[in-house]
Amino acid sequence: MRREFSEKELKERVKLNQKRLTDSYYQIESVFEDTEGWPGDKQGRALLAFVSHYKIDGTKIPCMEQMISCLNEKTNKDGYFGELASEMLNEQQLSGHSWYLRGLCEYYEQFKDKNILSILKSTVEHLYYPTQGRYKTYPIERGDDVGGVSGHVAKTVNGWKLSTDICCAFMSIDGLSHYYALTHDMRTKEILDEMITVFAGIDKIKVQAQTHCSLSAARGMLRMYRLENDKFYLEAARQIFELYLSNGMTYTNQNFNWWGKGDTWTEPCAVVDSLMVATELFKLTGDERWQTFAACIAHNGFASIQRANGGAGTDTTVSTTTHVLKMSSYEAPFCCTMRLAEGLWYIAEHLPVLYGTYSGTICKDENGCYRDGDFLYTELTEVMRPYVSDTEIQECDGIKLIPLLKWYRIEDEVLNNLEQRIIFTN
């Protein structure tokens, strides 16, 4: 049997996220304010979010066009944000501008504004072309770089300003590959090949790389494979996702924020990335294993990432050591709320693929979790009862179980104290 990702749920989520993106934090008076230390990041994610909603249902959030009209006055003389490029490479600036490239590319694809193409070309020429040949010098001996939900520059090594979001410089594979898709500029491809070769060779667990930037890089690699039909790109992306499945994904089909750092928190941005990578791998290879992972992410990983205010926040990392799913932070408005918009657009585009299969019988999986096919179950408690229909309740081992709750449907005062027990012992 199969259960669809319902259009009703999608519409509810989209409406809530659209409403959140009209709040003051995303209006023209504040949308150009930098997330501290991340020039181009908020601006790019915001523009990408606005265009994503336009692609979903034609909604034009007013700030989208207002941003476009202000770009020339808000950016530096070379068309991007922050300090002008120098010999010292700031990986947070490179990472942030990957989202700026993505937002501009998406806008250009929809509206064919030639001025946007000029801004894109200037940004790539002045910010990224000077980095050519430098990625092989990226420091991989990092020590103990401790970061929060939002990373910060921790140290300067070998001509690099390094972030606690380790390896975030390679996020740019995503934005640059999108630019290459529009322009087929061979110099961009040369930089991309250098970046992908270097990143593919980095031991991501050893350096404790951020899973979000790694999965975003994998999406860029898959974009290059679609463009070039070179299996080098497909294999590099596949290896990242295989590593993610074995070492980076929680039992709730979400992510550990970093590889190799144990229990930290999940990040909706990475959950969105993982859904897109799994689905693209399925589309490109036809291997139904990838469709299964995409379905699990859509139905379980997405269950808790959106809040009632329409934004997205972090959760606990359910694993062998953390058996309870609960909020880690209510919202990450500076990144995840905006990135959720692209995830919702992607789900809208792939509804026929994102179905989950089930048998009607719950059993324990290899991790000790209760599942029915692609659907993860949690123990029913009294606080959950108002949010569950009788038809959703099943029993196994004398325990009443329900599928993971959709947290966007739960009031904040309830969600603040809500815990879902996932792992059960015999």
Image (tube, helix red, strand yellow):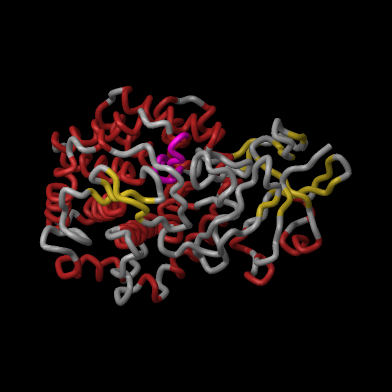
Q: Decide: is 111 above or below 22.
A: above
Give the residue furthest to the top.
Answer: 231
Residue nearest the viewer, comparing 229 with 203: 203
Residue nearest the viewer, comparing 51 with 421: 421
| Residue at screen point 50% across, 38% down | 353
- Magenta stretch: residue 148 in it? no
| Residue at screen point 35% across, 64% down | 35
Give left or right: position of 202 versus 157: right
Residue nearest the viewer, comparing 379 with 213: 213
Q: Position of residue 14 (x, y in %)?
A: 48, 60
Q: Position of residue 409 (x, y in %)?
A: 62, 63
Q: Position of residue 261 (x, y in %)?
A: 53, 43
Q: Decide: is 276 above or below 329.
A: above
In the image, the segment drawn in magenta is 206-215
| Residue at screen point 77% across, 35% down | 363
Give left or right: position of 223 versus 255: left
Hey, which quadrant is residue 368 in on the image? top right
| Residue at screen point 64% across, 69% down | 411
The N terminus is located in which quarter? top right
Give left or right: position of 13 versus 419: left
The C terminus is located in which quarter? top right
- Magenta stretch: residue 211 in it? yes
